[in-house]
Image (cartoon, rainbow, N blue to C red):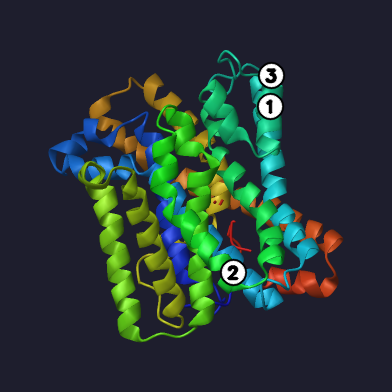
């Protein structure tokens, strides 16, 4: 991706770093639900607040991904098609399908086989749920609603709730662009949607699962990212002081939510999510407007997590379940539980890397070759991929 690049490949290294942090928090969250760091020997040397922040910000990380997705998708449309009114419907849907479908279909297929084989941790057995119901919900982009009605699915299925929100956004976004045609018309609608996040969450307090996974709160975060892309297109260059101010505000807001979540909640209730999405937008815009800057040294590994965020997101629960099983088989010593994170994290990255090289990239190239013209394929493959660009897309 060209915008905000900080290296020779044209990738936005700042956004890769933010995505890397987000997907790492998701993995740490799912490990922490099963092997909490605050119950390990690390609690004797590190603040429990820090350990809790590492383990329990996975949900917030998904909303950071939503902001990034909205920003990148809109930026790519504006760059490729020059305006919202000029969006190429066929090209947009072809790019989204070729990016998302191969891994999603493979994951649903593998999970179906594991369920039918009766493999522990993968069997759908909650009352009101079934394998066909889960399959149709995952492929029909309503798995979030399915869980809201029937309860949580097994972990590997559960992660697909965010894709349901993003894919519905992808389906509707080009149509909205063609109907509104001008940023001046679209922007007020986006502002209302973005600011509705606390209201929609408050209105759903009767159902904890649906409150977390409903369409409107996720769409509000995505709308925040779309607004950011429109701002960046309107002002492609800003003063360095503005960039630094945004970076500082974003970092402070992010740390406030993640390290003092209870305090922010007590002060703002559901408004704490606006602090999160606003902070994420500040960091995304700072990355966009600091193009050409050298990437932070020592964080290449985290940026690589960001580049593989989609693959890691879809597959990390296989590693989590395997490591937790081994941990319990070895005696489940809570004090030494932190040691099991050491193999789990690199294995999550490695599995994501294998999936990217063997499935994501080859399948995406082939599908785009079938659905787009050769010129369009060449342009598409030169872009950065993000989702959930690769969500999570999760970038093209």
Residue that numbered label 1 is attached to: 112
From the viewer's side, name the closer residue of 254 and 329: 254
Q: Secondary structure at mark 2?
A: helix
Given this view, does label 3 or label 2 mark the residue nearer the observer?
2
Q: CA distance from mark 3 to mark 2?
A: 50 Å
Residue that numbered label 3 is attached to: 116
Apparent side of residue 331 relative to residue 63 in the rendered image (left or right): left
Q: Secondary structure at mark 3?
A: helix
The quarter holding residue 361 reads: bottom right
Disc 3 + disc 1, Cβ < 8 Å: yes
Of the numbered discs 3 and 2, the one sitting upstream in the chain is 3
Of the numbered discs 1 and 2, the one sitting upstream in the chain is 1
Q: Quadrant of the N terminus?
A: bottom right
Apparent side of residue 371 relative to residue 204 in the rendered image (left or right): right
Apparent side of residue 60 relative to residue 213 in the rendered image (left or right): left
* In the rendered image, the vertical position of residue 312 relative to residue 333, given as above or below: below
């Amino acid at each position: 991706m060209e915008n905000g690049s900080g290296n020779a490949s044209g990738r936005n290294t700042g956004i890769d770093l933010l995505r890397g942090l987000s997907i790492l928090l998701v993995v740490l969250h799912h490990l922490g639900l099963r092997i909490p760091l605050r119950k390990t020997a690390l609690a004797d040397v590190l603040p429990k607040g820090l350990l809790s922040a590492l383990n329990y910000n996975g949900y917030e990380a998904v909303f950071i991904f939503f902001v990034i997705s909205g920003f990148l998708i809109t930026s790519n449309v504006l760059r490729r098609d020059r305006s919202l009114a000029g969006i190429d419907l066929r090209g947009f849907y072809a790019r989204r399908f070729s990016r998302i479908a191969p891994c999603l279909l493979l994951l649903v297929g593998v999970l179906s086989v594991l369920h039918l084989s009766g493999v522990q941790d993968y069997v759908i057995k909650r009352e009101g749920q079934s394998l066909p119901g889960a399959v149709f919900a995952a492929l029909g982009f309503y798995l979030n609603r399915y869980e809201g009605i029937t309860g949580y699915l097994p972990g590997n299925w559960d992660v697909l709730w965010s894709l349901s929100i993003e894919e519905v956004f992808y389906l509707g976004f080009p149509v909205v662009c063609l109907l509104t045609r001008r940023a001046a018309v679209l922007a007020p609608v986006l502002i209302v949607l973005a600011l509705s996040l606390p209201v929609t969450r408050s209105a759903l307090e009767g159902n904890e699962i649906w409150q977390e996974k409903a369409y409107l709160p996720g769409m509000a975060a995505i709308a925040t990212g779309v607004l950011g892309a429109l701002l960046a297109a309107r002002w492609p260059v800003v003063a360095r002081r503005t960039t630094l101010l945004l970076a500082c505000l974003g970092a402070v807001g992010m740390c406030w939510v993640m390290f003092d979540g209870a305090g922010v909640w007590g002060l703002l209730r559901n408004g704490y999510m606006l602090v999160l999405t606003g902070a994420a937008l500040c960091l995304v815009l700072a990355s966009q407007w600091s193009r050409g800057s050298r990437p932070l040294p020592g964080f290449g590994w985290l940026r690589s997590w960001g580049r593989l965020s989609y693959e890691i997101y879809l597959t990390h629960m296989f590693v989590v379940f395997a490591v937790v099983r081994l941990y319990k088989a070895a005696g489940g010593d809570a004090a030494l539980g932190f040691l099991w994170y050491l193999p789990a994290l690199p294995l999550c990255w490695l599995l994501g890397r294998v999936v990217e090289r063997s499935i994501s990239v080859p399948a995406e190239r082939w599908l785009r070759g079938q659905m787009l013209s050769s010129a369009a394929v060449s342009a598409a493959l030169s872009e950065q991929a993000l989702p959930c660009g690769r969500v999570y897309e999760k970038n093209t």
